[in-house]
Image: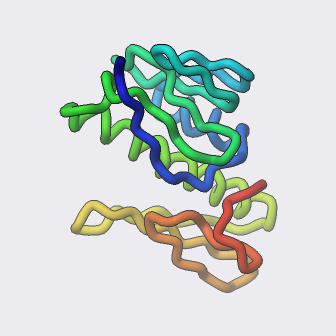
């Protein structure tokens, strides 16, 4: 039996998940109560990065669940999941900036980290790689 990899993720917005999939060229499977992953089934939103055997599921607790057959010992596939997380947070930041009439600036730092600055009404908030913080919450929502 294969094992699963569970990653913390503050993602709860299907619109931003779908936008991240579109940006990265991943298949967006949407919501289902029984996404299959080997012998396990999860309720949540599923994506299918290129080359994966099973869906990667964002469950209803906001955790990313991937089958280790897809990710174990494969740095490229692990990077694909990391890229999805970053693209998701960027989609949330872009939607927030657009809703507030602001702009965002994306900068890739020397160490590979991504810094996102959101300017709304003359103020700038630095976000880095972590979930954007709006109104005192770290949970990205739209």
Outermost residue to the front: 1
Is residue 126 left or right of 142 when viewed as pictured? left
**Residue 90 position in % (x across, y down):** 56, 54
Residue 53 location (% of width, % of height): 39, 14
Quadrant holding the C terminus: bottom right
Tell me which residue sits at (72%, 21%) in the image: 32
Image-quadrant location for residue 102:
bottom right
Q: Position of residue 30 (x, y in %)?
A: 69, 24
Q: Check the picture and name the quadrant holding the N terminus.
A: top left
Residue 60 lies, with reference to residue 54, above or below; the image says below
Q: Is residue 98 left or right of residue 111?
A: right
Q: Nearer the viewer, residue 24 or 36?
A: 36
Q: Residue at x 52, y 35 (%)?
A: 23
The residue under the point 62% across, 19% down is 35
Give residue 69's position: percent from left, percent from top. 31, 22
Q: Is residue 12 above or below residue 32?
A: below
Tell me which colouring the rendered structure shows: rainbow
Up/down of 76 relative to 95, above or below: above
Q: Quadrant of residue 94?
A: bottom right
**Residue occupying the point 69% across, 28% down:** 43
Q: How many numbered dots are placed on residues in this image?
A: 0
């Amino acid at each position: 039996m294969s094992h699963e990899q569970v990653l913390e993720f503050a993602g709860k917005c299907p619109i931003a998940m779908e936008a991240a999939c579109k940006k990265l060229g991943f298949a967006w499977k949407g919501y289902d109560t029984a996404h299959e992953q080997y012998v396990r089934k999860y309720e949540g939103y599923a994506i299918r990065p290129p080359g994966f055997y099973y869906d990667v599921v964002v469950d209803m607790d906001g955790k990313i669940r991937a089958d280790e057959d897809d990710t174990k010992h494969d740095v490229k596939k692990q990077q694909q999941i990391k890229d999805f997380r970053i693209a998701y947070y960027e989609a949330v930041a872009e939607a927030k900036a657009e809703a507030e009439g602001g702009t965002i600036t994306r900068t890739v730092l020397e160490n590979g980290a991504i810094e996102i600055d959101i300017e709304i009404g003359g103020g700038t908030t630095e976000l880095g790689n972590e979930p954007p913080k709006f109104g005192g919450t770290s949970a990205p929502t739209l």
